Amino acid sequence: MALPSATTPLYNYPLPDIEAWLQQQGCTQDDALHCWHVIRPRWEAEILLETDCIVVRYISAGSDNKDIQRVFKYSLSRQDLEEAIFSGP
């Protein structure tokens, strides 16, 4: 499946394209369909596709093993979101 241009804001993507993009990034979908997980060598995260934003929770990534949560708007491009989310906490 060919995705829209990397500079296209994510709000212009149909849901199947967003899901395909997450799969391309190595994410796996949870039983709760809006919830995705990704594991990298140095960190892991939960990605939630909410109605108006993407919530990323880096698990045990902060001081004292606390989670770090970041929120991103769908108005960001796929390229910007890839750089922000998948570069880690």
Image: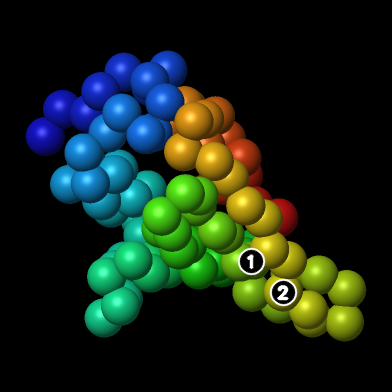
* Displayed quadrant of residue 8: top left
How many tags in the picture?
2
Tell me the CA gap for discs 2 and 1. 6 Å
Quarter-of-image position of residue 3: top left
Closest to the observer, 37 or 34: 34
Identity of the residue furthest to the left in this view = 1
Q: What type is the residue that disc 1 sits on?
A: Tyr
Q: Is there any visible trace of residue 38 in the rendered image?
A: no
* Mark 2 neighbour density, 10 Å: few (under 14) some (14–19) many (20 or more): some
Q: Position of residue 57 (x, y in %)?
A: 61, 66
- 38 to 85, vertically: above or below: below
Q: Residues within 10 Å of mark 1 (few under 14, many from 20)?
A: many
Give, as a three-letter code, the residue at label 2: Asp
Which residue in the protein does label 2 denote?
Answer: 67
Question: Hey, which residue is sitting farthest front in the picture?
Answer: 52
Compared with 32, 42 (above or below) is above
Whether residue 13 is situated above or below residue 57 in the rendered picture:
above
Q: What residue did someone put label 1 on?
A: 58
Callouts 2 and 1 close, C-beta under 8 Å? yes
In this view, which residue lies farthest toward the right? 63
Secondary structure type for disc 1 = strand
Residue 23 in view here? yes
Instruction: Tell me what residue is drawn at x 43 percent, y 59 percent.
Output: 50
Marks 2 and 1, the one that precedes in the sequence: 1
Determine whether, in the image, residue 1 is placed left or right of residue 30.
left
| 53 lies above or below 80 | below
